[in-house]
Amino acid sequence: GDADRQGLKQAMLSTASVINELAQSSSASEGYLMDFTARLAGVGSTAGMTQAQVMAFGSVLDQGMVAVEKGATAMQNVITALYRKPAEMAKVAGLDVKAFTTLLRTDGNAAVLQFIQALNDAGRMDALAPMLDKMHLSGAGVTQTLSTLAANIDAVRATQQQATAAFSAGTSVTNEFNAANSTRQAELEKTQKKLHDLSVTIGEELTPMVYGTLSAART
């Protein structure tokens, strides 16, 4: 997993950076991204998907107003079905069975994207829910979830690239922290200047007390 490749501490920092990056650049919420990723972690890992790729799906679904439980459950069931019965799923979407099965083995994320887009292009979204029901997987929310992703498939791909870059850099959350500290420092220096100007007016007697209070606040 990501933790094995990066080390736990850096992987956690990178994950936080992706969440921060996506939340700052869209209407997706941090809470939704964390909840969605946690719900999809097991199936996503089995499919060889990275956290960044999973979070990108979550970001687009949140922006599309798909409830997190509904969206995550739908994605879990679709991915499970793809690996359980790839030939049948490929036929439903009008895909070449052999080519799709090979893609599924080599790049699970690309296969999921291709399946969603093909299903939409073929106008077969409504056919998927009954099929999942026959496989004893819940079809609830599948049409809404996949339709939202299909309608925004370019956004999904772009968001995955953005999330992957943020994960690799692992600096988004650190940069925001530093920016906040810089703002705080600027405000502190501005306050100090006001105090200096004030000292000219009220004299030297009260200034040491005020600076003492300011220094205590900094520690």
Image: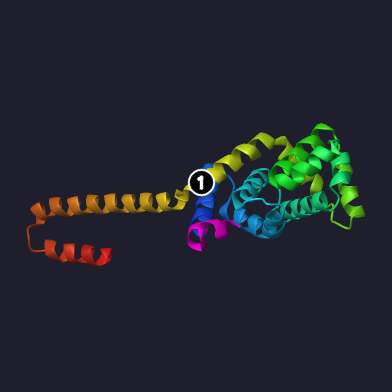
Give the number of marks: 1
Q: Residue at horizontal 44%, vertical 50%?
A: 171
- Neighbourhood count class around disc 1 (C-alpha, 10 Å): few under 14, some 14–19, many 20 upward: many
Q: Residue at horizontal 20%, vertical 54%?
A: 192
Reply yes or no: does residue 192 show up in magenta.
no
Q: Residue at horizontal 63%, vertical 47%?
A: 53
- Of the 4 image quadrants, the one containing the C terminus is bottom left
In the image, residue 29 sits, relative to residue 208, either above or below, namely: above
In the image, residue 69 sits, relative to residue 89, either above or below, namely: below
Name the residue beneath numbered marker 1. Answer: 166
Instruction: Specify the segment rendered in magenta.
Output: 1-11
Q: Residue at horizontal 7%, vertical 58%?
A: 203
Reply yes or no: does residue 8 show up in magenta.
yes
Where residue 101 sits in the image (x, y, percent)? 80, 43
Q: In the image as oriented, which residue stretches furthest toward the top?
A: 121
- Of the 4 image quadrants, the one containing the N terminus is bottom right
Where residue 19 sits in the image (x, y, percent)? 54, 51
Q: Is mark 1 on a helix, strand or loop?
A: helix
Characterize the magenta stretch by its predominant secondary structure. Answer: helix
171 vs 207, left or right, is: right
Where residue 56 sits in the image (x, y, percent)? 62, 46
36 vs 84, left or right, is: left
Q: How is the image coloured?
A: rainbow
Q: Which of 13/65 is in front?
A: 13
Where residue 207 sits in the image (x, y, percent)? 12, 61
Q: In the image as oriented, which residue stretches furthest toward the right?
A: 134
Kind of residue indicated by mark 1: Ala
33 vs 70, left or right, is: left
